[in-house]
Image (tube, grey):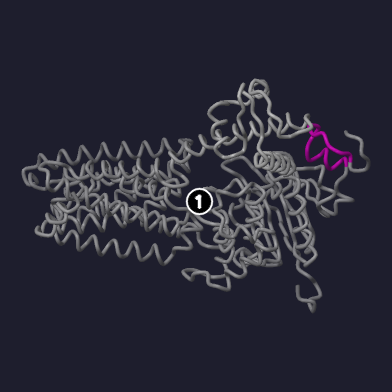
Amino acid sequence: MNPRDNTTPLAIEVTDLTVAYQEKPVLWDVDFNVPQGVLLAIVGPNGAGKSTLIKTILGLVKPVAGRILVLGAQYQARKQLIAYVPQRSSVDWDFPTNVLDVVMMGRYGHLGWIKRPGPSDKKLAMDCLDRVGMADFSNRQISQLSGGQQQRVFLARAFIQDAPIYLMDEPFAGVDATTEKSIIELLRELKRSGKTVICVHHDLETLKEYFDWVMLLNVRRVALGPIATTLTHDNLRRAYGGRALFLDPKGEQRV
Amino acid sequence: MFEDFFYLVAGNYTLQIVALGALILGITAGALGTFAVLREQSLLGDAISHATLPGVGLAFLLTQDKSPLTLLIGAGIAGWIGTICVKVITQTTRVNKDAALGLVLSVFFGFGLVIITIVQKLPTATKAGLDKFLFGNAATLLKEDVTMMIFLSSIVLFILTLFWKEFKLLTFDTDFFKSLGLPFHIFDILLTTLIVSAIILGLQTVGVVLMSAMLVAPAAAARQWTDRLGVMVILSSLLGAACCVAGAITSSIIPHMPTGPVITVYLSLTVIISLFLAPHRGLVWDWLRIFRNRAMIESASILENLLIISESHSDPLHPHSMALLKTMGSHALSRNINKLIKAGFIKKYPDQLLSLTPLGLEKAKQLARELQNEGGKN
């Protein structure tokens, strides 16, 4: 971040991370480093622990063992450094509130307890809605939004946090092709401005087109690195087993 | 009827106390009920209120004191233990949440009934009147009780206003709340405590059996009328207060009428009216909308079919037979045709012949364009 620093801290540094629900391990001894400024996709089969990994980094799930550093900072300090986009289906969209209000919720961390959002927060929220092309919807009741619009409202809520790192849980789930294109454009814009973006992703077909880094995960970390060198036939087979049918990363034939 | 109420209350000190107590209760339960409903904790409210009963009985057994403060502190502690039981059972065993709620509700309530029955048979306690905690008796509210209610309710509403934005986010999106670094457990416990307090507030007036109606019904009704959380809380408070005051006074006037059931009757009416008649969300408007849409689609299809036929003819306004339209699948022909004639879109000729008017031709073309655009969007 600071140009005078000789060593730029890693965006995310995870060491020996193990997470278990009751007895069953969901993540097992996971190590990885994510440098700053990448657009990283986390892929893996169902139950691979993708969402759990994101939630653990955020501190929503308590690990059994392991250490997580965000930009070199420990647990408490890192919360202001990450903006989170949860799965769209994780909230009740019939909640009595409107679009602008939801976006302003992204400011609550900055505001601190008790203090209410003011006109400057409102202006910020409108700017963020404008960025995702939803400015005209600011007064819309959230139950009247389509899936793609809901996703863009969640993105605006993350943008208003103005964090260096973005963690997104399936931002493309259930949105139409046009919205998917506009969302990926927004993510690229984040990357261009030096932010680190990490998404749980499920579509192997679009992986190469959308992202520049990839992590293959299946309870253990299978591989992590730039797409070109990491998305190999061998790694995919190790992450998905023999079950998956997907594009061979070198050619167009199916395996 | 309202005037009768007014004169009765205006001239009667006891009724004024009762009405004031009911007012306080209605406002507080209505406000907190909004959060109970939106957090999907309505059943938790029911379990907590039932779980307070053994607390009332034990508090009396241990202290031999029947002052409301003592009894309600006992109720509060029991309610809290009930809440913790639900949490512990769901988190540590394989019993799922609604079974845990059912367990706590019935076990605590059964235990409470046994204690109350024992207490009622004690020679020292014949006039303790603990049975009023079952179905409530607003007429027994004294000035001291109402003073205490005002005090407790002010604290509850003050905390609710103070942490408004935290409670709102907690209710809407728990994961995001945690991701901001806000302390989830503190606010979760705080909000649950406020809900428990609202329940305690109503035990004497409404009783443990029906107290959950006082939480859930005003909120459910208010949700029908508004899409804003702030408005919903205020509206829920007002509806709760109105029903509660009306019920408390009605039951005070009619001898041997327990208050809880009367309030619940008023609340039910409010909910039914709201479910059916509230604009936008009301069922009646839904039905009307569906009916109107169907009629509109039928009329539109008649216009479009006429357009399709006319395209195969040099004169677009040339009349065609109704039988042809029927074969093209236009429904409820005669009813909709009269409407279309009135609107000036089509013209009727003898021998069951129909034609578009110039206005109708424009309309049909516009509809066809709209249909195409919508197809392109998806």
Q: Which residue lies furthest to the bottom in this view?
A: A4
User: Position of B342 compared to B81: left or right?
Assistant: right
User: Position of A252 compared to B307: left or right?
Assistant: right
Q: Which residue lies furthest to the left in this view?
A: B123
Region of the chain picked out in magenta, as a range: A233-248
Q: Give the quadrant of the C terminus of chain B.
A: top right
* Residue B51 in view of the camera: no
Tell me where residue A210 appears, x and y as whole percent: 81, 51
Disc 1 residue type? Phe
Circle 1 crowding by C-alpha within 10 Å: few under 14, some 14–19, many from 20: many
Tell me where residue B362 appears, x and y as whole percent: 69, 42
Q: Is B280 placed above or below B158 here?
A: above
Tell me the quarter of the picture where residue B147 sits: bottom left
User: Position of A124 compared to B317: left or right?
Assistant: left
Q: Is B335 placed above or below A11 here?
A: above
Tell me where residue B347 appears, x and y as whole percent: 62, 33
Residue for badge 1: A95
From the viewer's side, name the closer residue of A108 and B119. A108
From the viewer's side, name the closer residue of A56 and A246. A246
